[in-house]
Amino acid sequence: MIRLFNTMTRHKDEFRPLDDMKVGLYTCGPTVYNYAHIGNLRTYVFEDILKRTLSYAGYKVRHVMNVTDVGHLTSDQDAGEDKMEVGAQREGRTVWEIAQFYLDAFRKDMQRLHLIEPDVWCRATDHIAEQIDMVKALEAKGLTYILDDGVYFDTSKLDNYGKLARLDLEGLQAGSRVEMVEGKRNATDFALWKFSPKDKRRLMEWPSPWGVGFPGWHIECSAMALKYLGARLDIHCGGIDHIAVHHTNEIAQTESVTGQKWVNWWMHGEFLTMARRDGDQKMSKSSGEFLRLQLLIDKGYDPLAYRYFCLNAHYRAQLSFSWEGLDAAAMAFDRLRKAAIELREHASAQAQPIEAAMNEFREAIEDDLNMPRALAAAWGVLRQSDSPPDQRWATLVEMDRVLGFDLPNIQMPAAKVDDDLARQVEDLIAQRSAARKAKDFARADAIRKQIADMGIAIEDTPKGTIWKKA
Ligand code: AMP
Ligand code: ZN
C-alpha cells in the first residue's frame, strides 16, 4: 500500500488510481525563457522518484509535462511582461529560438540527473485552439468578464474557489488594492486571455473571438491536461509556490468546464533555499541567486551527486543548499558508487534480492516517498558483509529502479580512477620500500611485479621511487 501526502486533504492517504493499475500524472513543466536552476530541478527529481515508485509498484504511469512558451508573466498578478518576450529581447533571438534552446538545455539537465522523460511533452503554443475553446466554454457558463487588457475569470462565481490553498478570500480581497489590475472585480480573478497592447505588436500573438492576444498562463495546463489525460486525473504535481495561484486557478477552470472533481492527488515539492546572512531564501530566477546544474559540473561535481543531495531530504521538507552540504552528498555518493562497483563483480543471474532489505526499502518509499530512509536501506545492504555478495548486488539493482543512479552501468569518473590507482601504487611502493629495508628481497620483487602487472613502471632514484604509467 502506497501512502502519499495530498495537499488537498492535508494528510497521507492510501493511493488508489481511478483505473486499476493505470496512473495519469501531470507535472507542471518549465517556462523556457531561461535555464532551469537547481531549485526547479529539485522539484523534477521529486516527481521522478514519484513516477519510479509507482512504476516499481507495478502501475503503468502516463506522464504528461507541459512546456510554457507563452503567457507566463513576470508578475503573478496578470501584470508585467511575458517572460518569453523578455528572454528574446535579452538575447536578441526570436521567442521560438529561445524556447527551443532552453527546452533542449532542460532536457539535457534531465538526462544528466537520470530523470525519466514524460510520455507526452506539450507546448502551450501548440495548443492555442484548445485554450481558446476552454475560455469559450467558461464564457458560455457566465464565468468570465472582459476588461481593456483581457478576458478574466470571475472567481466569486464559484462556491469553493481557493479550496486547495484554503485561501482566506476576504483577507485577500481587503489586502489586495495595490496589485489589482484596473477593473478586476476580485483580488483572485485572473486572466484567461490577454490582449496584445494596442500600440505594439507582440512577438507571439493569435486571433481569438475576443481580440488578438495570447493565453493566460494557467489555462494551458487545464487545456493540455484535459486533452492528454481526460476529465479526471490521478496525480498533479508542482512546487509549493504553485498551490495558491497556479493550481488554484487550474482547478477553477477545469472543474468549471467539466462539472466534476478533477484531480485526486495534489502533490507539491518544497523549496530548495539558499543560505544567506539574513536567513534562508527560496532559490529563484528573479532574485539572481540562481545556480545551474552546469555550474556544479564545472566545479567538478557529478550531476548524480546533486540527485543524491536531493534524495537525502524528504521532498516535503525545505532543503537548504550549501557547498558544504553538496560536498558531503558528493562524498557519500562516491562511496556508494565505489561500493556498488565492487559488489557488481559478484553479479550472478540466479541471485535473488534479500527480502528483509527490500521490505525495509519498500516501506520507506511507500511511506510518502521517504527517500532518506530508502537510502539508509541501500547503505544497510552495502554494509551487510555477512550476506552473499551476489544477493546484495541483486538487492541494490532492485533498489536502483527507484533510486535511479543506474548502478548496473555506473563507472567511476576517469579522474577518480586515476586517484584510486595513484593511491594503490603509492601504497605498494611504500610496502616495497619496507620489505627492502627489512632485507626481504623476495617480497620486494613480488611487489615490483605486482606493480608492473598494473601497467606501472617504477624507477628507484636517490630521491626515492618514482612511477609512471608504462
Ligand atoms: P518554472 O520554470 O519557474 O515554472 O518552475 C518550474 C518548477 O520548479 C515549478 O514546479 C516550481 O514550483 C518549481 N520551483 C521553483 N522554484 C523552486 C525552488 N526554489 N525549489 C524547488 N522548486 C522550485
Ligand atoms: Zn501548470
Image (cartoon, rainbow, N blue to C red):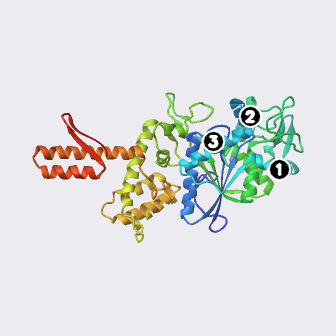
| Residue beneath the point at 18% across and 34% down | 462
Q: What amino acid is labelled 1 in the image?
A: Ala
Q: Quadrant of the N terminus?
A: bottom right
| Residue 71, numbered label | none
Residue that label 1 marks: 129
Residue at 46% x, 57% y is 409
Indicate the quadrant where residue 246 lies.
top right
Residue kind at label 2, given as amino acid type? Glu
Distance of mark 2 from mark 3, alpha carbons? 23 Å
- Give the SS element for disc 1: helix
Assess disc 1: are there few (<14), some (14-19) or many (≥20) residues with their C-alpha within 10 Å of its C-alpha: few
Mark 3 within 8 Å of ligand 1, using the beta carbon: yes
Disc 3 target residue: 241
Residue placed under numbered mark 2 in the picture: 85
In this orientation, does residue 31 appear? Answer: no
Q: Secondary structure at mark 3?
A: helix
Q: Which of 58/137 is in front? A: 58
Choose top left, top right, bottom left or bottom right for residue 323. Answer: top left
Between discs 1 and 3, the one toward the N terminus: 1
Expressed as whole percent of the image width and height from the top left, the position of residue 320 reads 49, 39
Residue 8 screen position, x and y as percent: 64, 52
In the image, 362 versus 126, the foreground residue is 126
- For the residue marked with disc 3, what is the amino acid? Asp
Q: Are marks 1 and 3 in contact (CB under 8 Å)?
A: no
On screen, residue 228 above or below 352: above
- Give the x, y percent position of residue 405: 48, 53
For label 3, count other residues whose C-alpha is less than 10 Å away and answer few (under 14), some (14-19) or many (20+): few
Q: Nearer the viewer, residue 13 or 64?
A: 64
Judge whether 444 appears above or below 184 on screen: below
Closer to the chain start, of discs 2 and 3, is 2
Frontmost of labels 1 and 3 is 1
